[in-house]
Image (tube, rainbow, N blue to C red):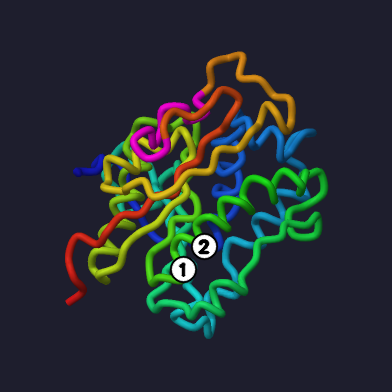
């Protein structure tokens, strides 16, 4: 799948943190789950806490079976240049080269707190949503060695340039070169892009948003009703469906 020649993918540096934080929160600004997680809007403390987690210890001394964080950005370059471009999207990967033991993967629990997610964040929603998605992914993967895509986001003003596709191609090429599968928790909006790159449905999280928080989809937003239908059937009304997906390696490691 060719990428846009105006898009360049590279590994991120600490100088990119500000752009990454801005893209992360603007990309999902109109997402119902983000509105529930940040009911009063995204605070400066939330942004600071998020920024602090982008480069965890620079992977220094991280065991291969614990996973190495790889953060990539996509730059928009209207004209060919060797200089910097405009950062329009990013992807955060976890590269786990070796499988984890059952005791190891079962011991890792998700627990969001105000101290880790920031003031103004509704951590009960975070734990119900991201925590449950993480648990489903963990229990399905059972510690397998894989390249995990933890997040992909694109600036709302720079969509349809091929930045998301370029970032995904970078990741699946890496996974294939290592002979590893790739895994992701797909949002309703991202599901079709992952399908194009060979990710397969393996499980779903149907979060009862209307029953739990009283939010009704009055504007016809994509809540994933038609995603993973062959696996789980259409999602019921009032539910936001996220899909756990896995892409098998396309070739063995050399």
Q: Check the image and report above or below for 249 versus 88.
A: below
The x, y position of residue 180, in whole percent, is 30, 67
For residue 138, the mark is 2
Q: Nearer the viewer, residue 181 or 142?
A: 142
Span highlighted in magenta in the image: 222-232
Residue at image x 26%, y 47%? 198
Q: Which mark is residue 252?
A: none
Q: How crowded is the residue under tag 1: few (<14 C-alpha within 10 Å), some, or many (20+)? A: some
Instruction: Identify the residue at image location x=47%, y=49%.
Output: 185
Asked where in the image residue 159 lies, by quadrant, the reply is top left
Q: Tell me the quarter of the image containing the N terminus.
A: top left
In depth, the one of 88 and 34 nearer the eye is 34
Could you tell me residue 140's position as x and y percent?
Answer: 46, 60
Q: Residue at x 47, y 30 (%)?
A: 224
Query: Element under label 1?
Result: loop
Q: CA distance from mark 1 to mark 2?
A: 6 Å
The residue indicated by pointer 1 is 142
Q: Secondary structure at mark 2?
A: helix
Is residue 66 shown above or below 81? below
The percent position of residue 212, horizontal first and vertical second, equals 72, 33
Residues at circles 1 and 2 in contact by the CB criterion of under 8 Å: yes
**Residue located at (38% from left, 72% from top):** 145
């Amino acid at each position: 799948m060719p990428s846009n020649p105006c898009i360049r993918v590279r590994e991120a540096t600490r100088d990119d943190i500000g752009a990454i934080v801005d893209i992360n929160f603007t990309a999902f600004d109109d997402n119902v789950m983000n509105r529930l997680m940040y009911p009063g809007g995204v605070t400066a403390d939330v942004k600071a806490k998020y920024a602090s987690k982008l480069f965890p210890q620079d992977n220094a001394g991280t065991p291969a079976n614990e996973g190495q964080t790889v953060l990539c950005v996509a730059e928009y370059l209207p004209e060919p240049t060797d200089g910097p471009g405009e950062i329009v999207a990013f992807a955060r990967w976890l590269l786990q080269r070796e499988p984890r033991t059952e005791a190891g993967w079962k011991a890792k629990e998700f627990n969001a707190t105000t101290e880790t997610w920031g003031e103004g964040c509704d951590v009960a929603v975070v734990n119900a949503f991201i925590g449950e998605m993480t648990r489903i992914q963990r229990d399905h993967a059972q510690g397998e060695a894989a390249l995990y895509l933890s997040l992909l986001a694109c600036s709302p003003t720079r969509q349809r340039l091929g930045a998301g596709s370029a970032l995904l191609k970078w990741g699946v090429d890496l996974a294939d070169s290592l002979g590893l599968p790739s895994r992701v928790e797909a949002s309703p909006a991202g599901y079709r892009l992952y399908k194009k790159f060979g990710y397969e449905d393996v499980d779903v999280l149907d979060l009862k948003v209307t029953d739990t928080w009283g939010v009704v989809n009055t504007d016809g937003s994509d809540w994933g009703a038609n995603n993973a239908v062959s696996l789980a059937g259409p999602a019921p009304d009032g539910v936001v469906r996220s899909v756990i997906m896995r892409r098998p390696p396309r070739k063995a490691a050399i």
